[in-house]
Image (cartoon, coloured by chain):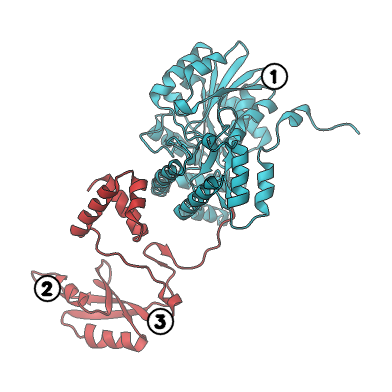
Chain colours: A cyan, B red
Amino acid sequence: MRDFISERAQVIPPSGIRKFFDLVLTMQDVISLGVGEPDYSTPWNICESSIYSIEQGMTSYTSNKGLQSLREALSRYLAGHYRLTYNSEDEIVITSGVSEALDISIRAIVNPGDEVLIAQPSYVSYAPCVTLAGGVPVPVECTEQENFKLDPEALQDKINDKTKALIINFPNNPTGGVMRTGDLEPIAEIVADNDLLLISDEVYAELTYEGQHVAAATVGDLYERTITLNGFSKAYAMTGWRVGYVCAPKPLCEAALKIHQYVMLCAPVMGQVAALEAIRSAEDDKNRMVDEYRLRRNMFVAGLNRIGLPCHVPEGAFYAFPSVKGTGLSDVDFAEGLLKERRVAVVPGSVFGVGGEDHLRCAYAVSRKNLSEALSRMEAFISGL
Amino acid sequence: MDEKDLEILRILEENGRIPSEEIATMTTLSKDDVAGRIHALEDARVIRKYTAIVNWEKAGNGEVSAIIELKVSPERDFGYDRIAERLSRFSQVRTVRLITGTYDLQLLVTGRNMQEVSRFVSEHVAPMDRIRETATHIIMKPYKENGNILFEQPEAERLPYSF
């Protein structure tokens, strides 16, 4: 029999933490800081409106682009919160989470052989999505010395005539790094000078703890060459609803929409109804959660530094990214030992690409009680080394 | 009263027993600053008291609570204040509120059993001057008190690892 698996499916790597997954399932009483989602359940008013819509029989397909009411609400929301002007008719597509938004955006712009730069450490899907689209992912390292911001020189170094696009994600998963206007301006210049396209995944935008989130498309001349990705999962504790969106100038958005209509048709209508309610009425719930994450961040990061895991203060998202260099262990060995000996699950930083090695991603979207217990266990693990 | 004070109040409202060291790290203030601010908030009577929210049904002391609604004729010069303050002095009365709607005052009254509550209402509350009408609602089962859900909720299953 032939080998039926495509070359592209063969070359993308399996999950970097399969062995941790297998291990944790055999264990009891594990505190997991390995999650990429809020510990909250979705605010009840959001759930309630979706339940009601199901009772009313709203269970069919929606327009490919998504519910018009949701796109209109989103268009106003983006203008009001981020000064992003996308019209609801042909510049916004509602997707099944940012994951799909990312995939269709990349497929809309990448030709075989195109190089796509990825600011790393980064979310694990960017590179495989580029590969699956026939492109070549090229990492650009964001270093701890620069507070995990994207450095213009490092970016410039990686650009050649095959370079097509740049993918960034700020506030960043896994580092919690953010880019302010002044940080984005030189990047905007480089992107424009080299005629690149920018894909900016801003799913953690609402989780910015000091000052306001700056949408990349509002900086310099980026608007016309930026695809903005965002979604409801993180800010509104709605990971399971699978609702995200692509925003871009009309020609780019239409290309993404074509792919979306063939591969997804539309995002689930229950999720879209929930997302609309989130925009309409969950601002206070969201702010309460963000306030609580800020307190947990302050407590957890201070704790990490105290027990000997140096950690910069993440200004966004809900991850701390401490260094384990001083312990003499690699990030993978540290994470494995910590899980086996002290039953705390964290993700080794090297899973997130270049710049992630020797670090751990610890989600602090976990109750304060579990965070302090995790800190004690981590301290005990370190003192036993 | 600034943003940090409000932050401290929110933390304390959620957990009145939290050590001030923890409040200090969470709010990025010094421990002394936190202690000083809490003192000031106590002195200003913004913080009234530190108490526990008890699920008495679970504790099994068998107490009975009732919401009593009252129609009251307000007094010249005093409105509802004097009668509301008078009612507040009874130890059986846990809460007194002036409300809009059909009734004027709403009380929460507790007693050892139903007889005790109804005796209290009929002997002490109903006969008071200016009270025109009472309606007594026995509380059968509390589900949420002061923002705290009292019934057991299954813990949502989350993946141990996700990206």
User: Mark 2, mark 3: which one is toward the viewer?
Assistant: 3
Q: Is mark 3 on a helix, strand or loop?
A: loop
Q: What subunit carries mark 3?
A: B
The image quadrant where one finds the C terminus of chain A is: top right
Percent position of residue A127, x then y: 63, 28
Give the answer, above or below, for where B90 lies relative to A271.
Answer: below
Q: Can residue B126 be seen in this view?
A: no
Task: Name the disc covering residue A77, or none.
Answer: none
Q: Which amino acid does label 1 sit on?
A: Pro
Q: Compared to A343, does A328 lie above or below?
A: above
Depth order, front residue of B45/B38: B38
Image position, residue B51 (x, y; %)? 32, 67
Q: Which residue lies furthest to the left in this view?
A: B77
**In this picture, residue A385 sits left or right of residue B90:** right
Residue that label 1 marks: A112
Decide: marks 2, 3 in contact (CB < 8 A)?
no
Label disc, if present, on residue B75 of the rendered structure? 2
Distance from the alpha carbon under mark 1 to that under mark 2: 85 Å
